[in-house]
Structures are given as structure tokens and as C-alpha cells.
């Protein structure tokens, strides 16, 4: 990402249903968006692929969090490798909710570096 690019992101957090997600995607697809900023939406992990398939090409789709390393026996985790395989180029790492549950700086740094490497 170039330093002179503005990014507008929307983290959908743990919200939505299939119908609500489809409504949001439809609204975004019909919206007039500024070309001065990159727009990124981050739906709940279960909706990432569906949103990516239906959303117009000038809006990027990101994930909410990723694992600290590659694929493996890590129930419930999503690796940056999986996200990259799906073409997801953005991820929210270290949000306040996870930090409030005890996610330490060191883990956030490891996740961020691993995601950047992918």
C-alpha cells in the first residue's frame, strides 16, 4: 500500500445474516464511491467468500483476524495462507475487543508480520 492512499474500512464485527449481508452488498454495489480512497469491508469470516464473490471490484474485502502461523490443527482459526488463497488482501488485526480479552502486543505483532508476509 502506498503511503499516499486513503483507506476507508468498515468492520462488520459479529453482525449480520445472509439477508443483511446481501442487502449491504447490494447497497454498496449501487453506491457512488469516491475514487480518492480505497474502500474495504470486513464481514464476519463466515461471509467473506460470499461477499467477495458478489461485491463490485472496486471495493476490497478483508477478514476479521487471522492466525499467527500457517495452516494446521488450529480449530476455529483462519490462516493468512487461507485468506491469500481466496484473494483476500486485507485483515483486521488487534481490534479493541480482542485486546480486551487479553490478546498481547507480541501476538498482534506476530499476526501482523505473518499476514504481511503472505
Image: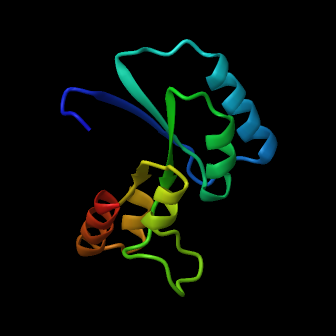
The answer to which of 2 and 18 lies nearer the viewer is 2
Mark count: 0
Relative to 66, say whether 44 is above or below: above
Which residue corresponds to the image point at 50% horizontal and 16% vertical from the top-left?
A: 33
Above or below 47: residue 104: below
- As displayed, is residue 44 above or below residue 35? below
Taking the image as drawn, is residue 15 in sight?
no
Q: Residue furthest front?
A: 85
Q: Is residue 103 visible?
A: yes
Residue appearing at x 66%, y 41% in the figure:
53
Image quadrant holding the N terminus, namely top left
Answer with left or right where residue 97 lies relative to residue 46.
left
Task: Pick whichever, 72 or 68, lies toward us.
Answer: 72
Scheme of colours in the image? rainbow
Q: Is residue 101 left or right of residue 110?
A: right
Q: Quadrant of the C terminus?
A: bottom left
Residue found at the very far bottom of the displayed protein: 73
Counting from the top left corner in percent of width and height, residue 63 is at: 50, 53
Q: Position of residue 3 (x, y in %)?
A: 18, 33
Q: Position of residue 10 (x, y in %)?
A: 49, 38
Which residue lies at the image location 45% right of the left edge and 66% below the top edge? Answer: 81
Q: Position of residue 21 (x, y in %)?
A: 71, 40
| Position of residue 105 in the picture relative to residue 12 (left or right) | left
Q: Residue at x 75, y 31 (%)?
A: 23
Amino acid at each position: 500500500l502506498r503511503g499516499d492512499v486513503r483507506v476507508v474500512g468498515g468492520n462488520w464485527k459479529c453482525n449480520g445474516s445472509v439477508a443483511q449481508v446481501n442487502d449491504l452488498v447490494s447497497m454498496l454495489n449501487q453506491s457512488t464511491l469516491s475514487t480518492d480512497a480505497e474502500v474495504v469491508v470486513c464481514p464476519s469470516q463466515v461471509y467473506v467468500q460470499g461477499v467477495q464473490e458478489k461485491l463490485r471490484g472496486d471495493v476490497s474485502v478483508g477478514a476479521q483476524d487471522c492466525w499467527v502461523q500457517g495452516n494446521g490443527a488450529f480449530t476455529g482459526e483462519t490462516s493468512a495462507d487461507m485468506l491469500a488463497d481466496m484473494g483476500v488482501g486485507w485483515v483486521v488485526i488487534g481490534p479493541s475487543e480482542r485486546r480486551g480479552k487479553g490478546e498481547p502486543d507480541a501476538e498482534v505483532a506476530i499476526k501482523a508480520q505473518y499476514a504481511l508476509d503472505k
